[in-house]
């Protein structure tokens, strides 16, 4: 007969006595939980590992051991605050489904791609992400598609929808972590830290934040060396039939601002392109995502759009394009995106 050194009740007492660890260790059901952002010492980690093993043995018939073997997840759950400040408990981050190109890109930047089992259609960088099973577009997700991949957690931004699909995931017991969709450097930091906490990769997350801050500082230095402030019109195009122009409160507006340009329109969000508005705005530069430029027929195709040829940008053929996710994603490469946009909007500054 095998004799265990701990009875289950004594094990609970041992866990609760670990109050010297900050944040405290807590037993929730049969799960050892440590609050996110904890900086445990090596002795603390060893002690928690011992407690986890003891818990595994203490459960009837060693059922905890069999459960751990069946699901290769850490026995330590984490609690991550979502964009609304609500706690989301994640006990297993071994099977991720992500929606939103920036979220998927952050997972790769944190070297967590081996956990990805599905992504959405906007997850186009890095290229291997495009080979993963897809669950629709971030704003029009298929709950059935997500559930078919048997995820242990779903991570997206506040742009995710429809609400019924998210509710269906929660009803199925899937932790749904919705992070900030802010078009700002601070918003990017929140996303990085949220994903890093969910993956228990806090140190890598902070290293990625520091890299972002360095690259943003380099971009700001590049902007400081420019003398012009061109008026820029951003067109979101998907062929000749879908043409919308960016105003304020958009990712394009914020990127243009950070790159030392002036957005051509002051209204909020997007409005359909019209010849009268384009001519009145008189933009110096026309900016599009790379795929948008391609579907519109290149520069010549853009110049045929209503009103474009009558603008200063059209007359000078100043039509520029950037990678979609680099320009609009507000992910970990945002600093590099701003630097690239500075180069496109201020060609006179090259070489300085």
Image (tube, helix red, strand yellow):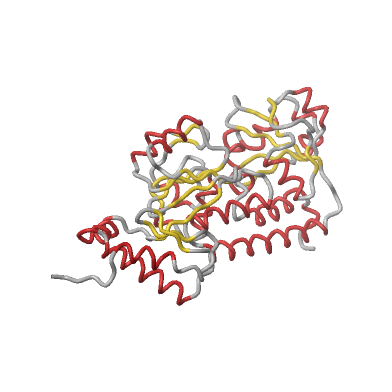
Q: Residue at x 69, y 48 (%)?
A: 184
Q: Residue furthest left?
A: 1
Where does the image place residue 317, in percent across and percent down from the top left? 74, 39
Total count of labels: 0
The quarter of the image holding the C terminus is bottom right
Q: Position of residue 85 (x, y in %)?
A: 59, 46
- Please tell me whether residue 340 is drawn above or below residue 275 in the rendered image: below
Along the line of sight, the residue nearer the viewer: 195 or 221: 195
In this rendering, the answer to whether 244 lies above or below 223 is above
Asked if 291 appears above or below 223 in the picture, the reply is above
Q: Residue at x 53, y 34 (%)?
A: 139
The percent coordinates of residue 268 (x first, y second) are 73, 32
Q: Position of residue 178 (x, y in %)?
A: 53, 43
The residue located at (59%, 44%) in the rendering is 83
Say whether residue 102 is left or right of residue 266.
left
Hey, which quadrant is residue 204 in on the image? Answer: bottom right
Question: Which image quarter is the N terminus in?
Answer: bottom left
| Extreme residue in the bottom direction | 43
Tell me what residue is drawn at x 57 percent, y 55 percent.
192
Frontmost residue, 197 versus 270: 197
| Left or right placement of residue 298 versus residue 248 in this view | left
Position of residue 85 in the picture relative to residue 171 (left or right): right
Depth order, front residue of 152/231:
152
Q: Nearer the viewer, residue 352 or 77?
A: 77
């Amino acid at each position: 007969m095998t004799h265990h050194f701990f009875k289950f009740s004594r094990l609970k007492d041992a866990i609760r006595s670990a109050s010297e660890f900050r944040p405290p260790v807590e037993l929730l059901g049969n799960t050892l939980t440590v609050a996110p952002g904890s900086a445990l010492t090596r002795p603390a980690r060893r002690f928690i590992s011992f407690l986890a093993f003891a818990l595994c043995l203490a459960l009837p018939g060693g059922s905890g051991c069999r459960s751990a073997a069946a699901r290769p997840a850490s026995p330590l759950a984490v609690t991550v605050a979502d964009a609304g400040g609500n706690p989301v408990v994640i006990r297993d981050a071994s099977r991720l489904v992500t929606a939103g190109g920036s979220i998927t890109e952050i997972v790769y930047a944190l070297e967590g791609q081996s956990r990805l089992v599905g992504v959405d259609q906007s997850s186009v960088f890095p290229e291997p992400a495009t080979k993963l099973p897809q669950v629709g577009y971030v704003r029009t997700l298929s709950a059935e598609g997500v559930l078919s991949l048997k995820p242990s957690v779903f991570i997206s931004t506040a742009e995710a929808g429809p609400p019924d699909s998210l509710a269906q995931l929660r009803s199925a017991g899937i932790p749904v972590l919705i992070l900030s969709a802010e078009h700002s450097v601070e918003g990017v930091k929140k996303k990085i830290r949220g994903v890093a906490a969910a993956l228990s990769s806090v140190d890598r997350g902070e290293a990625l934040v520091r890299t972002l801050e360095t690259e943003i500082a380099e971009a700001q230095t590049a902007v400081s060396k420019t003398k012009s402030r061109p008026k820029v019109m951003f067109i979101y195009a998907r062929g000749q039939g879908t043409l919308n122009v960016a105003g304020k409160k958009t990712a394009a507006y914020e990127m243009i601002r950070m790159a030392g340009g002036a957005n051509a329109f002051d209204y909020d969000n997007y409005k359909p392109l019209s010849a009268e508005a384009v001519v009145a705005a008189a933009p110096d530069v026309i900016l599009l995502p790379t795929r948008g430029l391609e579907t519109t027929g290149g520069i010549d195709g853009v110049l045929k759009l209503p009103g474009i040829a009558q603008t200063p940008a059209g007359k000078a053929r100043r039509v520029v394009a950037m990678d979609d996710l680099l320009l609009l994603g507000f992910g970990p490469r945002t600093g590099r995106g701003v630097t690239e946009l500075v180069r496109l909007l201020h060609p006179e500054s090259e070489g300085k």
